[in-house]
Structure formats: structure tokens, C-alpha cells
Amino acid sequence: MPVFRGTLHALDVPGTAVLGAVVISNDRWNAAMSQVTVLPLVASPRPEEREYALGYRHGAISAARPLTVLAPSDPNSVLGPPIASLSTAELDSLEDLLCRFLQLPALLARIPAPARPLGAANAYPVWGDVYRGPVLAGERKRFVVVSPNDWNRASGLAVGVRTTTRLKIDDTWFPKILDGKTRACCGDATTFAHSQWQLARRDRPTPFTTSTKDMVGIARGLADVYDLGAAVSRMASE
């Protein structure tokens, strides 16, 4: 079953307050890859995520909790059948929220020189740092944190993009970072609880932090794979 950006699907996750999920990865990614990125439709957003939530139907779509899930063609996918499609205005609003959450306007400015945010790397995942996450497919993957520190500290969650040594599509979606051999998989942004991140310094990979250049490359990939270019332009003109 093809998956299209901006479509609300049922989400087969028992025992959660998630009412569904909206596909946010673009259709080129969805057609080429085995996983897609969705934003959850929650019954009630947390207080700290209301600024990143779009009221929709009887709940809210949270731009602060992207999830990477298997495409419906995989029998193990939790993504159910399509329910509805967002209007152009609704999708524009959701793009703006995600763009602001990922701090893309500052990173993609003409002179991208955002101040490196300070954080407690042993207390919660810090923006721009590299951590080992949970075991996936028998391997403990490495992730670069792309969510803002205020969110990481307050929510008990953090969003990361997986790293890889393989170039699957192109340098935009899989930019080189760190040692030049590692790449960020920008279409695999997903959310984990603090308990799923290996925060202790002894458990951190080497190198354990990125450069501004790395994060700008990741921002370009995020903007492209989630079709946020128009949102970046809208926010730059504000």
C-alpha cells in the first residue's frame, strides 16, 4: 500500500493515548525506503508540547514526537489504514511547528552560526551530541540529538537521527558528519525516552559531539526529506 505525506493513518499501538499518526516524510522517501516518519495524533498534548501541537479533530498532532515506523507493506508495521488527509492549511501549520521544533530557521540562515546550546549531557540527551540508543534489529544504534534542550530536559524524551556508514540515496538525505565516514540518516528521526539513551560518558561513542557544519548538513537533510523548505522560507520572513 503506497504511503502519502499528509495522510492520517490508524496506529496499531495497544494501550497508548495515540489516536493515529500523520505521515510527514515526503513521497520520494516513502517510495524508496522501508520506513516512514510520522507525527502522532494524541488525545491530549503534554503541557510542554502544546507550543508544538496542532489541534486536529478530537486531539492534537504533535510535531515534537516524530516516530520512524515500518511502512504498511511490512507485515510488522504498526501503521494502519488511512483515515483522512490534512488540508493544505493544516499541513502548512504542522510544517511550521516541526520547522520551529527542529530549529531549522537558525541552522539554515544565510550565516548559520547558532550558539552551541549548553546542556547536562549526563542528565538528558543534549542537542548536537551523539549517543547510543536502544537495541534495534540486534544492534545498539547511534543517534545525533536534533530536538532542543528545553524539550529534552522537560519532557523526558529526545529526538535523534540514526547514523550509518552506508549511502543509500544521496548526500542530502544522508550527509557526511563527524569523521567523514559516518552519515546521518535524516529520514529516520525518531523519539526515545531518556531511559532508552545511553547517557553515561563511558557509554558514549567517539567522537561524541558534532560540529556546527554537521548540524547544518543534518538540518538541510531534515528540511528536504520532510518537505519543510516552504516552512523555512515562511519563518525567515517573519
Image (cartoon, rainbow, N blue to C red):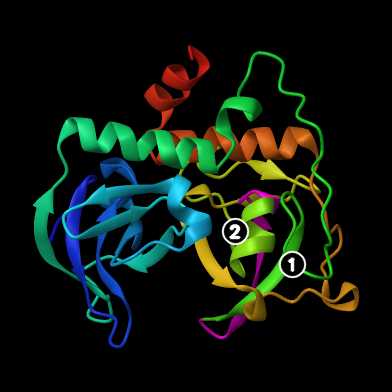
Answer above or below: position of 237 versus 126: above
Which residue lies at the image location 90% right of the left edge and 77% below the top edge? 202
- Res. 72 in view: yes
Left or right of residue 140, residue 10 in this image: left
Q: State the CA–CA distance, disc 2 to disc 1.
A: 12 Å
210 or 63, nearer to the observer: 63
Left or right of residue 24, residue 87 in this image: left
Q: Quadrant of residue 177?
A: top right
Q: Is residue 124 magenta?
A: no
192 or 150, nearer to the observer: 150
- Res. 164 in view: no
188 or 119, nearer to the observer: 119
Percent position (x, y) of residue 101?
53, 43
**Amino acid carrying mark 1 in the image:** Tyr
Among the two numbered marks 2 and 1 on one chain, the one whose residue lies closer to the N terminus: 1
The range drawn in magenta is: 137-149
